[in-house]
Image (cartoon, grey):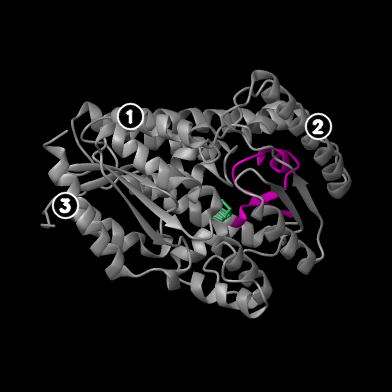
Amino acid sequence: MEEKKGKINFLKSQGPLVKFQQEYWQEVREAKERGKKICWMTTVAGHELPQAFDLVVVSPDVHAATCGAGKVGGRLCEVSETEGYPIDVCSYPRVDIGSALMGEETLSPVKPPPADIYFTVTNPCDTHAYWQQAIARHLKVPQIVIDQPYYHDQWTAEDYREALDYLTKQFEEATTFLEEFTGKRLDYDRLKEVATESYKTGELWKEAWELAKRVPAPLTGFDWLFFMFLMNPVRGRPETTKIMEMFVQELKERIAQNIPAMTDEKTRIFWDGIFCFFAVGEQISKLLSWGVNPILARYPCLWRDLYPKDPSNPMRSVAEVGLQPLGLWYGVRRKVEWLIEMVREYSLDGLLFQTTKTCVSFRNSIYNVLEETEKATGVPGVIVETDQVDERAYSSADFAAKLDAFLEIVEQRKGKR
Ligand code: SF4
């Protein structure tokens, strides 16, 4: 594939974002000195509840991804494997467990202190329960587990209501536990305040996804990856909303002034799966130099709906976040319908499924989804096996070769559709 010489216009709001991230990890490291307790909580659902108890929230998956970006994922996985965790366990837990086992000697670039409590929601997958249980037992700290019913295509409105009742009850029980653990009663107004802030941030994130439909796009697919942090452990803070506002405002200004993120956006693709955090730099320069924008990236796109929608009823609304259809648990038919719609809405030319062998959630039915979507839209796709944080499972040359061949097909098909 011929290399293009396009230019990237980086977003100015990335500066405040990076500063905020650094401040967040500093706050986490200093939390215990300031007498605060640390709650490690599954990303996705319910962060508002521990925040309302003034606990500092750390997401194990965000931490594992940060280790991956710091290129220490493989070595941390080896630490877990030496202790008997099999290589076919997802690399997120292997990294995170490896880091916990190393204690203060951890290779983690952000070196968060150990948890005082684990709060697990099994929304992304059941692995979360066992991964966090392993560390909670090692640290001898308590673990709350919220059992998440998996959303599926046949759900009726009644099923949904029952699932929401079931989740709300569990969050109420978790509240009782947290009241004992912290020695404080839940301040319901504070919960409402945090949920309201999350709602504002979430609405802005959703708006950004609408703005990304513009051709050429005001941002690249990799910008999602960086700004996704705002929807995770820091959701629910006014500072978070402020940076999200800057991000969305900048996208709007770019659209108004006709400034694309890439001066040479030739091809727009869907990127399924989790990014390879250790190879992001390499992949950015490769894709963008070819004029390819992975504008619809599934991982950050999951958060389009993952925030409390009705802060006036905060407990139920926080519980409901986990019930938002992640798209991961849809059946083949629904996944295909969604992707066909996305091909149209985001003007996609290709479908790249970057898949991790150990992640059942993301791998779930991708072969059928790719085949069916390709048949219905004429948009070609490819499946590339890699890993999100374990660089030992990644070959730069293999990835480049597959991508090259795939993009040749994309180019050929473009004229024929
Ligand atoms: S198996 Fe997949 S969904 Fe589960 S923790 Fe790993 S990457 Fe996340």
Q: Nearer the viewer, residue 363 or 97?
A: 363
Count how many numbered circles sit on residues in the image. Answer: 3
Residue linked to disc 1: 211
Q: Identify the residue shown where x is 82% and y is 65%.
A: 140
Residue 283, image x, y percentages = 30, 59
Residue 217, picture quadrant: top left
Residue type, label 3? Glu
Label 1 close to label 2 by CB (< 8 Å) = no
How far is mark 1 from mark 3, CA to CA?
28 Å
Q: Is-magenta flag for residue 38?
A: yes
Q: Which mark is residue 32?
A: none
Q: Which residue is mark 3?
A: 408
In this rendered view, identify the residue nearer to me: 382 or 276.
382
Residue 126 visible in the picture: yes
At numbered mark 2, what does the secondary structure look like: helix, strand or loop?
Answer: helix
Q: Is residue 266 left or right of residue 169?
A: left
Residue 169 marker: 2
Residue 176 screen position, x and y as percent: 86, 39
Give the residue type at disc 2: Lys
Which of the two discs, 1 and 3, labels the residue nearer the N terminus?
1
Percent x, y for residue 21?
A: 49, 53
The 10 Å Cα crowd at callout 1, few under 14, some 14 to 19, many 20 or more, is some
Real-space CA distance between mark 1 and mark 2, rounded to the nearest whole angstrom: 37 Å
Type of amino acid at the residue the image marks with label 1: Leu
